[in-house]
Amino acid sequence: MTECRFDRRAFLGGAAGLGALALFGSGCSPRSQSARPMDEQAEPRIDSVVWGHCSPNCYGRCALRLSVSDGQVVRVESDSTGDDAYGSHQIRACLRGRSIRQVLNHPDRLSYPMKRVGERGEGKFERISWEEAISIIAENYRRILAEYGPASVFITNATGVQSKNINPFLGRFLNLNGGYLINDGGYSAHQTKTALPYLYGKRAGNSSSDVVNSKLVVMFGDNFAENKLGGAGDTFHLQRALEKGGAKVIVIDPRFSPTAAVHADEWIPIRPGTDAALVEGIAYVLITENLIDRPFLETYTIGYDEGSLPAGAPANKSYRQHILGEGPDGTPKTPAWASAITNVPEATIVSLAHQIAEAKPCCIMQGLGPQRQGNGEQTTRAICMLAILTGNVGIKGGNTGSIFGSYNLPGISVPQGKNPIKAKLPTFMYAEAVLRGRELTKKNAGIKGVDRLQQPIKFIWNYGGNSLTNQHGDINRTKRILKDTSLCEFIVVWDIMMTDSATYADILLPDLMPVEQPNFVAGEYNGDMGYLILGQPAGEPRFERKTLYQSLCLLAEEMGCLDEFSEGLDEEGWLRRVYTEAAEKNDYPTYDTLKGQGVYRRLNPKGSTVAFDKFRKDPQANPLETPSGKIEIYSERLAQIAATWELDPGDVIDPLPIYAPAVGGWTGEPDERYPLQMVGFHERGHAHSSFVQVETLRQANQPGFWINPADAAPRGIATGDDVLVSSPSGTLRISAKVTNRVMPGVTAMGQGMWFKADENGIDVGGCANTLTSHHPSPLAKAIPANTLQVQVRKAL
Ligand SMILES: Nc1nc2c(c(=O)[nH]1)N[C@H]1C(S)=C(S)[C@@H](COP(=O)(O)OP(=O)(O)OC[C@H]3O[C@@H](n4cnc5c(=O)[nH]c(N)nc54)[C@H](O)[C@@H]3O)O[C@H]1N2
Ligand SMILES: Nc1nc2c(c(=O)[nH]1)N[C@H]1C(S)=C(S)[C@@H](COP(=O)(O)OP(=O)(O)OC[C@H]3O[C@@H](n4cnc5c(=O)[nH]c(N)nc54)[C@H](O)[C@@H]3O)O[C@H]1N2
Ligand code: SF4
Ligand SMILES: [Mo]
């Protein structure tokens, strides 16, 4: 076994060595150093073939097999281990992963450290040395720490690099210098992660593979066929489970999504943000026709009826009373009532209720689209009510109503040390914390750990993320906030491309990608098959790109904490150490074995994951993590929050999982200025803003603005026309796709395209966040990306 030790001299290189190509590694990788002319016509001689993984945040974590010739990746294949048999199936890459050479070798890839010379956002930079970059960062970091303290230092929510051995180094470095304000919740699932614990104690779901045991699957806004594309992702597991088990599938989505197109027996279009009202209409039928599972409700829940309401709750605030019109609003939630809100026909609502009641077991599940709304916390709990009313929780073939769970192998843990800062900021409140940090409190901004922020954000570290601007809501406003250097005083960005967020960097650093360094990932969203992928650097680093770890070592040296930070190890030394610890604990192959074989798989030894199965079997012995130990249909904790938090007009937190309209969304009143609803979606051509630079992928998956013929005709819009889409936040220009695949009154577009303003401030890049709002959801204070009203007109 070769010990890969950190060679401080070779690594830091001294002034002359800074930025030199030879800085990476010291003979630990099996790469040839020989230079030789390559005949363009001939097959290149392959010097080595190494494992790696594709690393964007697409919920897939796929294996790559990279052939290297003369220090360059010349061929990309995917998993060559395993076979087609379920449980040893290959973790095959999608077209994005297979195009990784076009990312690695993109002509616009960042190659040198740069210093901002224009205004923030202008995109004017000057090439500088690593030495200068490190000294400017360290100087500003020291100054800001002294002036505002570490609670003013922030790491953004940045998901572009999923290799678990890389990103943690940033927290480790900052913890050695006093810590940082914690970013809490993320953009993906913050509403559901926040709300479901009030109902169930924690968020959990049966695995996708368990659908093999279901008779009916009802999916609320899940589009796994497009957004779980990895070869071992839920798409594969579901497909197999549906083929084997034969369950009927109903997809509820405003769009006829690829999932609806490929997998659904029935597609039910619904007005965005109104799923909770649909649930109430179904609940009305279930209750009035006595189709509920009464023993389940009595044994496992509180708050369904008056008898199980907690003592402190108003006498008429049970779920049953609310549905039947005996609650505070006095309105029975009949299918007619629900139909007027959701646009789902009454007969369909009744039929849905009957189908759900009759199918034993029935899997109710939701994707993350419905909860990424201004009322997402109410919606995500409401959808679960269908599983609860029909007793489908805790059994095989049922589900909780949540997104699927999966069997994940424990990954590695790079020690980050202790962060003395306790304050946690909801991810989506980051721009507010830059603008008016000291105003943000527990009760008005969902701050956790402390009652209020002591400092605004003054220093931002952004590694592998485009959420400074492009992926954050209301981009025009966010850009104005970031542009003001008296607010956030310093921004460091590591990226591989000049993204919109990167143009806000004061110092911009050129990163090496995960496949260019030792890399590790554990599968997620992968049914019942957990797996690990361990990879080695493919190819030689080019230009002055460095790994995050190398640049942090340079910074640590400057800050006087290199020894504590590095513990004398290089990238491979760290990976070997932390992997070996995990391997011993979890009975994994040794580091050297996995280094050779690349991929390790393990099927769930228990079969499928069934959430809350122990609770179902014996609720006394295995109570839920709620205060009562039961499913809290009525949540006293939420009642308490609703009574004490300072909410904006229109924001609703209700102790019951019931419908409340979202601020900025559909109200039922005609909206003259912005008459159409819009939802975003995660499309297959790119993972957020990653891979957008790959021309062939863009050609294969042309983005477009979905609009129904009934809305397009009066506006004179045909497919292929450029349209201007406006919301209260901004205007963008995009090509129209006139289609019946989106319901009338609703429009849709993929998120993640790169913002690019023309001379009039119109975004011609087609970034969805030009249109979205910065008003957070009431409870989690999370991104309301799918709640918005727009107007559309043909561009001249
Ligand atoms: N309107 C709207 N906005 C949304 C969403 C939505 O549904 N609608 N979804 C939200 C969700 S769920 C999420 S998770 C976020 C995702 O938002 P982000 O976490 O910002 O993810 P990406 O847009 O993929 O940005 C990843 C960045 O990493 C860079 N990158 C890629 N490889 C490397 C590398 O090797 N090294 C470095 N240093 N950088 C690299 C890419 O160039 C890119 O700038 O977006 C959120 N924003
Ligand atoms: N190709 C690709 N795959 C990805 C990603 C990517 O960017 N590209 N991103 C990854 C990440 S980080 C995440 S978080 C996940 C995102 O996973 P999701 O959030 O589940 O994906 P979305 O496409 O945003 O939404 C899913 C569906 O919800 C629908 N929808 C929106 N609003 C509503 C509503 O109010 N009610 C109902 N019933 N449906 C609604 C949309 O039309 C869409 O078809 O995807 C992951 N996978
Ligand atoms: S599914 Fe995701 S991780 Fe897998 S190859 Fe595609 S982009 Fe890469
Ligand atoms: Mo996400």
Image (cartoon, grey):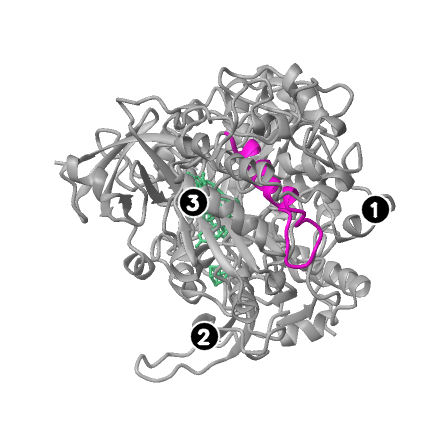
For disc 1, the marked residue is 622
| Pick the front one: 60 or 417 | 60
- Point 86% across, 43% down: residue: 620
Please tell me in which quadrant of the rendered image residue 269 appears.
Answer: top left
Query: Magenta span covers which residues?
Result: 375-400
Q: Nearer the viewer, residue 738 or 8?
A: 738
Task: Give the image location of residue 535, x and y in percent.
Answer: 60, 67
Whole-Å distance between the Cαs marked 2 and 1?
A: 59 Å
Name the amino acid type tagged 3.
Thr
Disc 2 marks which amino acid?
Asp
**Foreground residue among 496 and 299:** 299
Q: Would you say the residues marked 2 and 1 are in contact, meaning their CB atoms lie under 8 Å apart?
A: no
Measured from the top left, where is residue 647 in percent x and y?
Answer: 56, 17
Placement of 269 over or under 342, stated as above or below: below
Mark 2, residue position: 70
Camera-near label (1 vs 3) is: 3
Name the spot of residue 622 as percent of width and height, x first: 83, 46
- When the figure is inspected, residue 758 is found, relative to residue 778, above or below; the finding is below
